[in-house]
Image: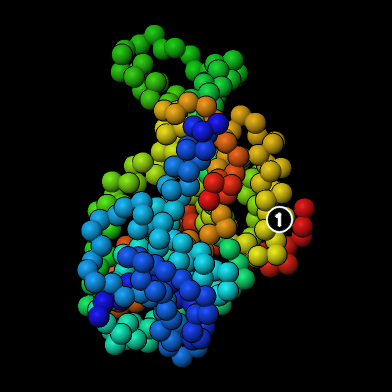
Amino acid sequence: MKLYLYGIIDSSDRIKDSIYGLEGASVYNIPFCNIGAIVSEINQPIQGVTKGTVLEHEAVTEKLMANFAVLPVRFQTIIDGRDNLLSVMQSYYKDFRDNLDRVRNKVEFGIKVIWPADKIKKSIRNSRKKGEHEMPIPDGSSNKKFMRKKLEKYRINEDFEQKADKFINVMDMFFSKFAAEKVLKKLKTENLLLDAAYLIERDRQADFKEAFEHIKSAHAAFKFLFSGPWPAYNFVILPKNSNLLKDSRQEDLFDKEIQHQDLVGADKI
Amino acid sequence: MDNAVTRSKDITLLEILDRVLDKGVVISGDAVISVADVDLIYLGLKVLLSSVETMEQLRGSPFVGPMQEAK
C-alpha cells in the first residue's frame, strides 16, 4: 500500500475530524512515539502538478494547523508502505520533534515588496549627475569612455543595493518585532525588493498585520503582497548532513541571505 | 472587480505553489516512491514565481489588498 504523506504532527492520537485528501481518500495519523505522520492511501503516483491536487494537499495541512503543530511535507511525497514510513519516522524522529517544538503555536506569513526599480535607478542616476559624484566625460579614447560607462553602471548598482538594504532594514525592523524567526531574500529580481517569510506567534498575528499596514501606508509607491497564515513551510530545518537528505535546497537554509533571529520577548510597537 | 479577485486568486495560487513545491519537509531515500519530478516542474515555475511583478504589469492595475482575503 502506498501512502501519500502530507505532514508530521505533534500528536500520536487519532484525528477526530474527517479530513479528505488527494483522490478524496480519508486522511489519518500513523503514530510514532509521541508524533504522527498524516497520510492517505493512494493507488498510483500523481501525474504532474495540477491546481486541484496542489490545493487538496495544502487544504489538508491547513486543516491540521487548527489543532496541531504541523511540519508540512513537500508535495507529492509518497512512501512505499507503512513499514517504510515508520522507518523514515524513526530516522528523522529527533529532527521532527525539534522542528515541531520550534513551530508550535506559530504560523507563517509571507510578505513580498515590489518597488519601481527603473524609477529608483533613474533617480540615482540623476542625483549622481547633479551631485559631486559626476564623473567628467573623458576626451580620450573609446576605451576610456567604455571604462567610464562601466564604472558608472557599477556605482549606480552599488547605490541601488544600498537603497534596497536601507528600505529592507526599516521594514524588517517593524516586522521582526513580532517574529520568532524570519527568512529574508533581497532583490530576487530587480523589482522584487523583498521576499520574506516570518514565523509569528498565533497570539501576535494582529500586531504583525498592524505593523504590515503601517509599513504599507508609509510606502505608497511600493506594492505589497501579504499572505498567510500558512503552516511553517519556510521554517523546517533538517540537518545539513543527514544521510537521507540529498537536497541542495537544505543547504540554502544556511546561506547568508537567509537570516534567522530569535526575538522572544521583543517589545510591541 | 472580478479581475481584481481573479488576480488575487492567481497570486495566492503562486504563493501556495512556491511553498508546497519548494519548502517544507523533504524526504529522500529508498522508501520514497515519488517527489522526483517536482524539481523539474519547479524549475519551470520558478521563473514565473519570481516574477510576480511581471504578472502584475501584464494584468494592469495594482494589487488589491492582502492576499489573505482571497485565500
The count of marks equals 1
Above or below — where is A240 with respect to A153?
below
> Which secondary structure lies at badge 1?
helix
In this rendering, the answer to whether A215 lies above or below A160 is: below
A169 or A147, which is in the foreground?
Answer: A169
| Residue in the image at 63% along x and 49% along y | A172
B55 sits left or right of A223 in the view: left
Residue A13 appears in the figure: yes
Decide: is B52 above or below A9: above
Q: Residue at x 48, y 43 (%)?
A: B9
Q: Position of residue A61 (x, y in %)?
A: 47, 66
Residue B55 as seen in the image, left or right of residue A214: left
Q: Is residue A187 above or below residue A253?
A: above
Quadrant the N terminus of chain B occupies: top right
- The foreground one among A157 and A269 is A269
View extreme (top): residue: A139
Q: Which residue is mark 1?
A: A206
Q: Is residue A193 visible?
A: no
Residue A252 coordinates in the image, percent (x, y): 40, 60
Q: Position of residue A254 (x, y in %)?
A: 44, 63
Q: How is the image coloured?
A: rainbow
Asked which quadrant contains residue A200, the reply is bottom right
Seen at 28% across and 72% down, the residue is A42
Q: Residue furthest bottom?
A: A33
Residue at the spot 58% in from the left edge and 74% down from the top edge:
A67
Chain under numbered label 1: A
